[in-house]
Image (tube, rainbow, N blue to C red):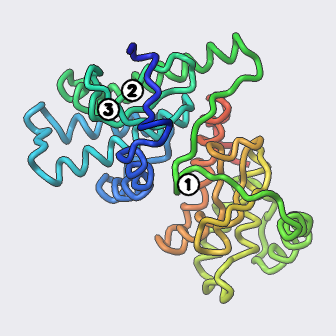
Amino acid sequence: MAIGDFDYLWPQGEQHPVLADWLENVQPLIAGLALRLPPEVRLDYSRQSMVELGEWVLARFPDEPSLDKTDDATLDLQIRITAYVGEALLLVGGGRWAYDDDERSMFYGRLVVLADDGAGIPTSPLSLLTAGVARRSNLFTKVHDVKRRRVAERRVAEPGWRPVREPTPGLTVVPEPDTAEHTAWVAAMDTELARFTAGLPSGTWDLSPASLDALGPVLLARPPDPAGDDDGAVRYVGEVMRRAFGGRWVTNDSPATPAGRRQVAVDGVVDRGVGRPGSAVANLRDKQDPGRLRFHLESYSRNVAGALGDDSRWLIPTT
């Protein structure tokens, strides 16, 4: 069977147990990776993150012997990098994770990504890591660029086409259908924003990206919302995201906190172009860093760019 014929199903159309286990662990693996990297390596799934991670990998692993798979910590790190690189490639090229159990394949026994390009050719993130170390080359960025180019070429040839990916639990959002409660929540946006901004110190609360720089210190100076949902702040941050880069409010019931339910999805591309204002506000408080609101806005901008294949949307407006 040729590479392009692989369906990666086991058996009788069922998901391979290795793949099923992997998909349940991708999100915690990536969360743990962030704790093992220096702060200058930002895991926001952008092309720049592939540049930064690739450079860090080459510094961390100076030669092939340093990829010692008998060392648990080294193996753990490689697995986490595999998860992140695969998700970044899915963001730009669409597709799905698969487990290669064909003994004739060069990726036998490895997790691979199958892009939504019709070719069916697998990419092994772990192989990109090991081959990159061997060649002293950042293959993460090179393959990312290839996939972006293929997507751009197909979009020119097929106007209206966009890559589609299968969701990864905990990372890609599948919103609930709009409920009466959600519709009412959105309808009250202007009223609730007016109420929230009326309680802020004097300033320019115009829902511009620049206003987030002023909002961060204000929120940190206040005690957390007794209700635990920071509804006004979530509305404000989410509206900044939506007005700056497009999208619509959606509801996702998987996060544990009420604020986490409210998210912004660009043009309905809910599994890739997603803004999480509730996470932005929570992250601001957890890290006591007023710049976290701007950080999450920039992450949303990059998600939008990845969803739409439009690099110009990476430019963050300042007003």
The image shows residue 217 at horizontal and vertical percentages of 60, 72
Mark 3 Cα within 10 Å, few/some/many (few <14, many 20+)?
A: some
- Provide residue 264's location: percent of width, then percent of height: 72, 54
Between marks 2 and 3 in the image, the one whose residue lies nearer the viewer = 3
Amino acid beneath label 1 = Phe
Name the one closer to the observer, 293 or 302.
302
Residue 157 vs residue 147: left or right?
right
Amino acid type, mark 2:
Thr
Identify whether 96 is placed above or below 260.
above
Of the numbered discs in the image, which one, if any, rests on residue 81? none
Callout 2: helix, strand or loop? Answer: strand
Residue depicted at x 45% and y 34%: 9
Residue tagged 2: 123
Q: Work out whether mark 1 precedes mark 3 in sequence or the reverse, and give the earlier one.
A: 3
- Against 309, residue 195 (above or below) is below
Q: For residue 214, say whether it is visible.
A: no
Q: Nearer the viewer, mark 1 or mark 3?
A: 3
Query: Residue visible at 57% across and 18% down?
Result: 118
Mark 1: give few (<14), some (14-19) or many (20+) Cα within 10 Å. Answer: some
Disc 3, SS = loop
Q: Quadrant of residue 138?
A: top left
For badge 3, the amino acid type reads: Asp
Q: Residue 247's spot in the image, x, y percent?
A: 77, 46
Provide the residue designation for mark 1.
295
The residue identified by callout 3 is 101
Q: From the viewer's perspective, is the residue at label 1 or at label 2 nearer?
A: 2
